[in-house]
Amino acid sequence: MKTDIDRLMREADLEALLITGPVAHNPNKAYFTGMVHVTSGYLLKQVGKSPVFFHPSMEREEAARAGLDTKDLSTYRPLELIEASKGDHIQAAVLLLKEIFNEYEISGRVALYGKTELGAGFGIFDRLQDSLDEIELVGEPENGSVLTRARATKDDWEVQRIREMGKVTTEVAGEVADFLTSHQAKDGVLVDREGEIVTIGEVKRRINLWLAMRGAENPEGTIFSIGRDAGVPHSAGQDDQPVELGKTIIFDLFPSEAGGGYFYDFTRTWCLGWAEEEAEALHQDVLEVYHSVFDRLQFDAPCRDIQIMACEQFEAQGHPTVSSSPGTTDGYVHTLGHGIGLAVHEGPAFSHLESNRDILLPGTVFSLEPGLYYPDRGAGVRVEDTVWANPQGEFEVLADYPMDLVLKMPGS
Amino acid sequence: MKTDIDRLMREADLEALLITGPVAHNPNKAYFTGMVHVTSGYLLKQVGKSPVFFHPSMEREEAARAGLDTKDLSTYRPLELIEASKGDHIQAAVLLLKEIFNEYEISGRVALYGKTELGAGFGIFDRLQDSLDEIELVGEPENGSVLTRARATKDDWEVQRIREMGKVTTEVAGEVADFLTSHQAKDGVLVDREGEIVTIGEVKRRINLWLAMRGAENPEGTIFSIGRDAGVPHSAGQDDQPVELGKTIIFDLFPSEAGGGYFYDFTRTWCLGWAEEEAEALHQDVLEVYHSVFDRLQFDAPCRDIQIMACEQFEAQGHPTVSSSPGTTDGYVHTLGHGIGLAVHEGPAFSHLESNRDILLPGTVFSLEPGLYYPDRGAGVRVEDTVWANPQGEFEVLADYPMDLVLKMPGS
């Protein structure tokens, strides 16, 4: 939570955080500013002090809406710096940042943040470091950074927004189910009233429409993959392919608030009309692990223990896992979940690695997503909900939706 | 264009380009891979050789769709590297990249690219540089990098996709105009049939809906700002505000293909029902500069000359400009345009700075967007089209739309 930042900065011996880049689709910046239309600039957070939002002059009114201390970058005469640097934009940025560091009397360790073009970022901060005596620029790993750790536990107002996206997500999942089951089948694939094949691309176009109607967006796309494709966890599904009956469909929906705000993450596996025995069995196994792990979730437990628990159960069912067969593409091939917030994947991590020290702290919002994959048998199954470790000491799914495998078709 | 990359690499004395990060919303990576669902990894382009796409194992089938040489990152045993590094993800990434550099016998200068979290990026490449003897990692400035320069001129298939987005954009602009003019006014603001105020937020929600219906998305948001807000070029407009008649509305729409593909950029200024004389005069001045500059565009001319031309004309009309009054917030306060492609703002640049050496090359797709801003008088005017310097030696607006200022309201 935001109130943890100063403590985490002190623990990491950081004097300041410097965040570059736009606000949109830049979680670490948006975490401080909220969703305002500011396309470049910096945010400086010194330990024990309020953050300062440095913004382009043209975006001064948008920046003011963030409710932070603001500073107009034109104060630093950026165009003159570019001319003085003979068009070397990297040198101009270095000079500007040195002026800011001087003005705010920064010394010690400064951590860098911001989703930005690496070339310019490396160019600027590599050269800036060379020209600084009393400052050490720090590139923290994403998994252990101060802001990753602060963001991993959510304030109530953040959970409220994620919950709202959960409502949108499950409503749209319902629309998709209604859309699919309102069609006829012909030669084993969905067709519309004119007998034209309904493609995966058409389903995805409607998903974006139903999301937009509810004020959401879909910046990372949707996974809607069928049969063999469903057997490869991150295959997104091919737009020109038909929607086949009786095959497993992995439908993974992870939209966000418009403008790049909070995400929700949700997956169901469906078979239209009917399911093969094997798919039924895989689905049963996945649900069993989901419920069993859910019931055994514990506050302040190591996240890796939860993944190990899932692996053990899948292995007991007879499936290979990432733990028993590293590198396997059959069986349980990924981690059990991940944190969710301003990024669809954020801390904590649930890998089984010994080096994973993440803890399931109160306030964590995370996905729980066991899955089984057998690409050569043309099948994949995953179910996923977004869960909150709430202040009452409970684990709460933020949006309910049925887990049935088979969606009945008319006449079936 | 892509065919320029090897020549530009040789000119910049670069042996290789290394691009990090996901494909979505990462223009330099998407430029090579197209829109496939691959969320991390690397792309390595050596001079004179085909690019190689390094992808996570789970995303192997999506990566294959890029049609490039691919390499599964599991080959490098990334989890073992993390364990061997005792959970230091930066060290693990350094080891993995060193292995790739060895395997592909990379030496010399390697330029870094990719929209990615700066902290991890700086941490990895700063440490990687320290451990390399025969490689110099290069952070090029965004404005002058090899890929910025290659991307600034478009292949015909890219123009076709931008043109398609132009069609979507102008269709949606028409929907917005129809929506606004189909309402009644009450006390000077738009109301619906129940007499409820129509807010800017409601207009923007519908814009996203109409875009989604056409398979587009709006990752950077929309500017729909009225009156005083319109006088501040990048104010996006406030969701809870009503739509007022008789005030200038700056409507700047810049959607992209779904999944983070090609953008279009378009602006019109509208007054609902009627316009004040001053707004009419400002609009006339802006149109005059638009047409006069358009008629004088020249192939292979310095882009800064075009901005200087615009400044001179605005000054002749009596307006302050960024050239005559640096730092002004009244008058003509920005540059005349920018390149458009996989990013809404890309090369070439049109600033008047002496250090701006960008040239209007054949194949460039760029915005032409003169504007005048007087926030204290509650007015701002901008018109913008996306223009292609086509192979026939002509400057071609990629989507036509009327430039009328006043949208007639029913009964007016």
Image (tube, coloured by chain):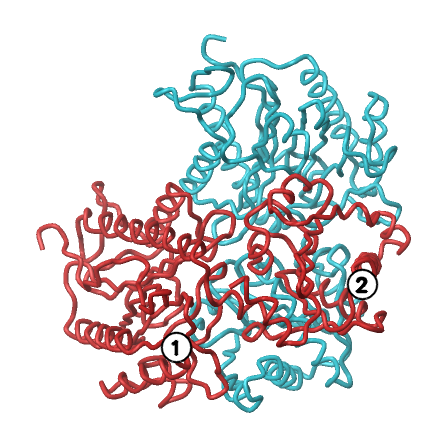
Chain colours: A red, B cyan
Label pair 2/1, CB-CB below 8 angstroms: no
Name the residue beneath numbered marker 2: A105
- Side (left or right) of A259 relative to A85: left
Tell me which label, 2 or 1, sits earlier in the chain. 2
- Identity of the amino acid at label 1? His
The image quarter containing residue B377 is top right
- Identity of the amino acid at label 2? Glu
Quadrant containing the C terminus of chain A is: bottom left
Name the residue beneath numbered marker 1: A334
Residue shown at 39%/77% (left/top)?
A334
Mark 2: which secondary structure?
loop
Residue A91 position within the rendered picture, expressed as x and y whole percent measured from the top left: 84, 60
Is residue A192 shown above or below A302?
Answer: above
Residue shown at 69%/54% (left/top)?
A52
Residues A46 and A383: in front is: A46
Residue shown at 47%/44% (left/top)?
B216
> Around disc 1, counting alpha carbons within 10 Å, would you say few (fewer than 14), some (14 to 19), or many (20 or more)?
many
Q: Are marks 2 and 1 on the same chain?
A: yes
Badge 2 sits on which subunit? A
Residue B208 position within the rendered picture, expressed as x and y whole percent measured from the top left: 45, 40
